[in-house]
Image: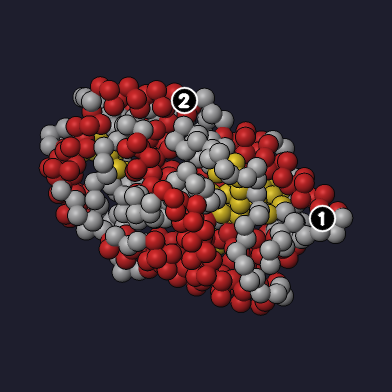
């Protein structure tokens, strides 16, 4: 079968989809990935055919821009949705044209992140199955509240309703631009209601988020979709990094991925004070931090595979994105979590409940004392043992194999509907 895979977001959104494409190709299928241009290097490294979608997610995350403002101001769900919609709505027409052209002749479309509504519409145009993919839980459940809400903000009896409310809020923010592009590019009628019945794959570890008991059969927690299965790669480190790792005690890793827009100076002052003289690796990512001002006990690293690096550090200080959260935990390492926006507080709370991270540090009001407490907790023997046990459990999963089997099954079922004249994605319009 031939699959078109469309996503739009940061590297944390694109990398798992690149890994899924590679797994589909290894199973004998064709796969073509469309995503933000600046995030496609993972696909190229895996030999996955890919093409860029319009837009610049890194620019959108810079200070003063839509998403950067949310990061810098500790925006809640409504502000986050508004910022995401601003990025998507500016590009919806272009994405519709690009994904429509790429999907010609495909057997199914796999859709994710900000490109999901566009991908679902294109699947409707071509009358082929659409399969959702996500690294955060979106399917309503009574077991926890929407991952876009701050933990504890909704009472437990409203958990399921919170998902419905947030998902509806997202659809309303995207609806006008989506329907305009549906009419202009695909000559489709307007969509009145949100999509709710398409199959959903979650590239999430059951060790971190067990399959909710009340989820339908078409929503599946697969396990992580890592870039490499064994936790090791054949990647060769630069000489400076290799020498630093061999030159003393196991270092702390510090990196905030694609986050930008926060108070860099205040955050790094607090981090440096809390770490003190301990050895540390720092990954600037998209933060814009002036790494030249770091003390000599810090070693600055560039893009480095998490599967290679994280087993070689003592703990991982990060922003709580789904990808880094999974990679740190898979490596058996405790975390110090500094969430800023979106689903990051959700993952911070999951790690706290599992006993492998302390309460998160407020990235918008960072204090050295809070970092120090979180580092002390992560350094305790009991915390390390819990992290090692959880990592061993995660490494037993094969989320990609589970996902490929589900894609094959659901795509085949959709083709059967198509064969009898039923469009797989028009229910609920």
Q: Nearer the viewer, residue 103 or 248?
A: 103
Q: Are marks 1 and 2 in contact (CB under 8 Å)?
A: no
Farthest front residue in view: 157
Which residue in the structure is indicated by mark 1? 418
Q: Quadrant of the image for the C terminus?
A: bottom right
With 418 as the anchor, is 408 left or right in this view?
left
Precedes in sequence: disc 1 or disc 2: 2
Please tell me how many numbered marks the rendered image carries. Answer: 2
Q: Nearer the viewer, residue 322 or 1?
A: 322
Residue occupying image coordinates x 63% and y 71% = 192
Q: Residues within 10 Å of mark 1 (few under 14, many from 20)?
A: some
Q: What color scheme is it?
A: secondary structure
Identify which residue, 243 or 321, lies in the foreground: 321
**Helix, strand or loop under label 2:** helix
Q: Which residue is mark 2?
A: 393
User: Relative to residue 50, is residue 160 drawn left or right?
Assistant: left
């Amino acid at each position: 079968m031939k699959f078109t895979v469309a996503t739009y977001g940061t590297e944390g959104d694109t990398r798992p989809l690149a890994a899924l494409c590679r797994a589909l190709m290894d199973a004998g299928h064709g796969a073509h990935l469309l995503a933000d241009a600046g995030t496609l290097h993972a696909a190229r490294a895996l030999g996955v055919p890919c093409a860029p979608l319009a837009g610049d997610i890194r620019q959108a995350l810079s200070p003063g821009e839509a998403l950067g403002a949310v990061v810098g101001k500790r925006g809640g769900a409504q502000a986050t949705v508004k910022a995401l919609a601003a990025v998507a709505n500016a590009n919806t027409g272009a994405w519709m044209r690009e994904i429509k052209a790429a999907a010609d002749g495909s057997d199914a479309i796999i859709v994710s992140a900000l490109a999901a509504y566009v991908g679902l519409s294109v699947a409707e145009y071509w009358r082929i199955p659409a399969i959702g993919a996500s690294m955060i839980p979106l399917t309503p459940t009574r077991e926890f509240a929407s991952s876009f809400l701050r933990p504890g903000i909704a009472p437990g009896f409203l958990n399921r309703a919170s998902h419905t409310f947030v998902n509806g809020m997202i659809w309303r923010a995207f609806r006008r631009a989506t329907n305009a592009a549906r009419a202009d590019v695909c000559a489709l009628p307007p969509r009145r209601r949100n999509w709710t019945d398409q199959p959903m794959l979650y590239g999430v570890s059951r060790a971190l988020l067990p399959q909710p008991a009340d989820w339908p059969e078409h929503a599946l927690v697969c396990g992580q979709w890592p870039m490499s299965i064994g936790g090791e790669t054949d990647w060769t480190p630069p000489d400076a990094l290799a020498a630093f790792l061999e030159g003393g005690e196991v270092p702390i890793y510090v990196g905030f991925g694609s986050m930008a827009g926060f108070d860099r100076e205040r955050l790094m002052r607090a981090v440096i004070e809390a770490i003190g003289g301990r050895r540390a690796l720092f990954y600037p990512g998209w933060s814009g931090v002036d790494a030249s001002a770091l003390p000599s006990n810090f070693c600055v690293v560039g893009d480095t595979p998490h599967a290679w690096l994280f087993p070689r550090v003592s703990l991982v200080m990060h922003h709580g994105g789904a990808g880094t959260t999974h990679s740190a935990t898979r490596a058996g390492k405790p975390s110090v979590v500094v969430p800023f926006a979106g689903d990051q507080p959700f993952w911070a709370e999951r790690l706290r409940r599992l006993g492998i991270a302390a309460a998160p540090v407020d990235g918008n009001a960072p204090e050295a004392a809070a970092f120090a407490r979180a580092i002390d907790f992560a350094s305790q023997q009991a915390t390390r043992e819990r992290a090692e046990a959880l990592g061993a459990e995660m490494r037993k999963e094969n989320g990609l194999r589970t996902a490929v089997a589900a894609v094959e099954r659901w795509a085949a079922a959709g083709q059967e509907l198509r064969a009898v004249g039923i469009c797989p994605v028009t229910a609920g319009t």
